[in-house]
Amino acid sequence: MKNFLFLCALLLLGYTNVKSQCTDLFISEYVEGWSDNRTLEIYNPTNKAIDLSGYALSRYSNGATTGTTPVPLAGSLGAYKTYVVEVDLRDTAGSGNTAPVWEELQAYADTFICPDYNANSTMYFNGNDAMVLEKTNATLVDIFGKVGEDPDPGKTGGGWTDTYPYNDVTLGTVLTSDHTLIRKHTIKQGVSTNPSYFNALTEWDTLPANTFDSLGAHTCDCYTGAASVKEVKYNDNVFFFPNPSLFGKTINVKATSVIECAEIYNASGELVCKRKNSAKRGEMQVDLSGIKPSIYFVRVVFDNKRSVIRELSIH
C-alpha cells in the first residue's frame, strides 16, 4: 500500500505531467445504489485501443490517506468505448451482510471484481469513499471524491453534497450516495491531482438511485465522429392502487409490460419483502401483511429485467 500524502508531496514538488485532454482513460459513470449495487464505468476518450493491464482501481475509505491494494484491470478497451466494472456479488443467496447485485445491473458488467471483502474491499465503496483510477506504476489517472476527506463521519449513509463546503451531510442534498452520476460530455480528462474540495456538480450529472440504462456507452466531446450508438428509450410504466394504502391490506399493480416480481424497500434501501408474479401477466396483487406503516419504495421488475420504482405510503 502506498501513502497518498507522499504522492501529494511529489505533486507539489512538480513531479507530475500536465495531462492533455482526450489522451487517457477516466471514470465516466459512478453507481452507488441500494444494497450492494456498486459500479464504475471507465471510458477511453482516445482514437486508439488502450491496454487495461496497465491500470488499476483502489478505494480510500472514510477519509483514509492510504488506499486498498490496487485491483489491476485486464483486457483491451477500444477507442471511444466503455468498460463497466462491478463488485462480484452474484450469489442470489448472499452471504453475511452482503446482498446480490441486481440482475439488470449485472447485465451491463464487462468484469466483476472483489468477490471477497476481506481479501480486497476496493469495490465495496459507499458515498463517503474516494475512488481512484491509477496506472500500475502508481500514476494517478482519475479521482472521484477527495482523498483524505470523510463527508459523512457520523456514518449516516451520506456522502458529498451539492452545497459548499460539500463535505457536510447536514447541508444540501447528498449526491454520492444512492445516486448514479454520469460525467458531463464536456469533460475530456480525469482529475489527476487531489482536489481542494469535491463539488460533484462541476463535472457530473446526477440521476436517481438504481438508474442503470446509461451504462455501456458514454457521450464525450472527445469523439467528433457520427453517432455510433443508437439511443434506445424504454417506456415501461407501472401503476398501483390504493396509494396511500392501509396496513395489512394489498395493493393492485398494473404495468405496461409483463411483471416478474415486486420488491418493497424501506427508506434506507433495505429489502422488506419480495413477491413473485406467478401469473406472468402485466398485473398482480401485492400482500402488505407484516409491513409496518411508513414510506416505502416499490420496485416492479419486468420479465425483460428492466424495472420501475415508485413510492408507496402505508398508513
Image: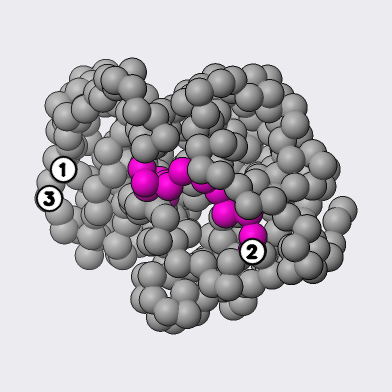
Residue 42 spot, x, y in % from top left: 55, 36
Residue drawn where x is 39% and y is 29% of the image: 223
| Looking at the image, residue 253 lies above or below residue 142 | above
Residue 192 within the magenta-colored segment of the rendering: yes
* Placement of 232 over or under 31, stated as above or below: above
User: In the picture, residue 273 is in which quadrant?
Assistant: top left
Residue 194's tag is: 2
**Amino acid type assigned to the residue bearing label 1 in the image:** Phe
Residue range of the region highlighted in magenta in the rendering: 180-194
Nearer the observer: mark 3 or 2; the answer is 2
How packed is label 3: few (under 14 Cα within 10 Å), some, or many (20 or more)? Answer: some
Horizontal and vertical percent position of residue 30: 49, 46
Q: CA distance from mark 1 to mark 3?
A: 6 Å
Residue designated by label 1: 240
Residue topped by disc 3: 242
Q: What amino acid does circle 2 point to?
A: Asn
Could you say whether the residue bearing mark 1 is in a helix, strand or loop? strand
Q: From mark 3 to mark 2, how far is it between C-alphas?
A: 50 Å
Q: Please name the colour scheme applied to the rendered image.
A: one colour
Quarter of the image where the C terminus is located: bottom left
Q: Is residue 289 among the parts visible in the rendering?
A: no
146 lies left or right of 272? right
Rate crowding at label 2 as few (under 14), some (14 to 19) or many (20 or more) other CA atoms within 10 Å. Answer: many
Reading the chain from its start, which is encountered first: label 3 or label 2?
2
**Relative to 66, is 279 above or below?**
above
Amino acid on which the number 3 mark rests in the picture: Pro
**Disc 3 secondary structure class:** loop
Indicate the position of residue 251 as horizontal and vertical percent values. 19, 44
Residues at circles 1 and 2 in contact by the CB criterion of under 8 Å? no
